[in-house]
Image (tube, grey):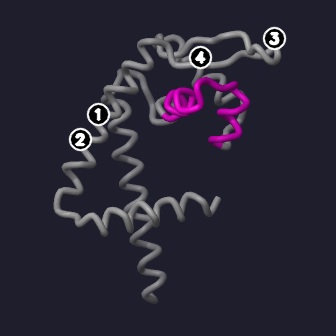
Amino acid sequence: MSGRDASIETIQRELTAFARRARHKASQMHPGLTLVMYSMLDLMNERGGCRAADLAAHFLLDKSTVSRQVSALEKLGLVSREVDPEDHRGQILRPSEAGLVLLREAYEVRRQSFTERFTGWSDADLADLARHLVRYGEAD
């Protein structure tokens, strides 16, 4: 196996492990909360609210999948719906007060976890990782 192939295999394995840890952490934040649901809630908050179609486009998901996830978030009391002021037929989804509390708490837990994980890393190493992750994310 070439050096490049070995590197790609290592990256694949490590990103898969990272995703498994992220799914596990999401389920620890709230019973019944999946990583997809958490990610949707986080995007709603980041954008100040959005439509279900925006979630589907951002996460490359089918509208029916988004609908099920949003319904589950509503049942957990983490999302509220408002009439879209620009199109009264549509709805804007926003984190509820409970959803905002969950996001704030999750942010602190994640920040602490990353801070601990990167204790032995130099500022330059962290900056390199951040730059490479952004570059990787822009490839889509």
Find residue 112 and name its label.
2
Q: Secondary structure at mark 2?
A: helix
- The circle drawn on residue 108 is 1
Are the two marked residues, 2 and 3, in contact with CB atoms closer than 8 angstroms? no
Residue 50 location, x and y as percent?
65, 26
Q: Report, in whole angstroms, how far the alpha carbon at label 2 lies from the one at label 4.
A: 30 Å
Mark nearer the N terminus (2 vs 3)? 3
- Three-letter code for the amino acid on which mark 4 is drawn: Ser
**Which of pointers 2 and 4 lies earlier in the amino acid sequence?**
4
Q: Disc 4 or 3, which lies upstream in sequence?
A: 4
The front one of 83 and 37 is 83
Whether pointer 1 and pointer 4 mark residues with C-beta atoms closer than 8 Å, the reply is no
Residue 104 is left or right of residue 8, and the answer is left
Question: Residue 78: image x %, image y %?
Answer: 48, 16
- In this rendering, the answer to whether 92 lies above or below 120 is above
Q: Which amino acid, by three-letter code, is at mark 3? A: His
Q: How many marks?
A: 4
Relative depth, front residue between 69 and 89: 89
Q: Which residue is mark 3?
A: 88
Report the Cα–Cα distance between label 4 and label 3: 20 Å
Bin the neighbour count of mark 2 within 10 Å (Cα to Cα): few under 14, some 14-19, many 20 and up. few
Q: Amino acid at mark 2?
A: Gln
Q: Residue at x 19, y 49 (%)?
A: 116
Q: Residue furthest bottom?
A: 2
Q: Is residue 43 magenta?
A: yes
Q: Are marks 2 and 1 in contact (CB under 8 Å)?
A: yes
Q: Residue at point 81% right, 11% down?
A: 88
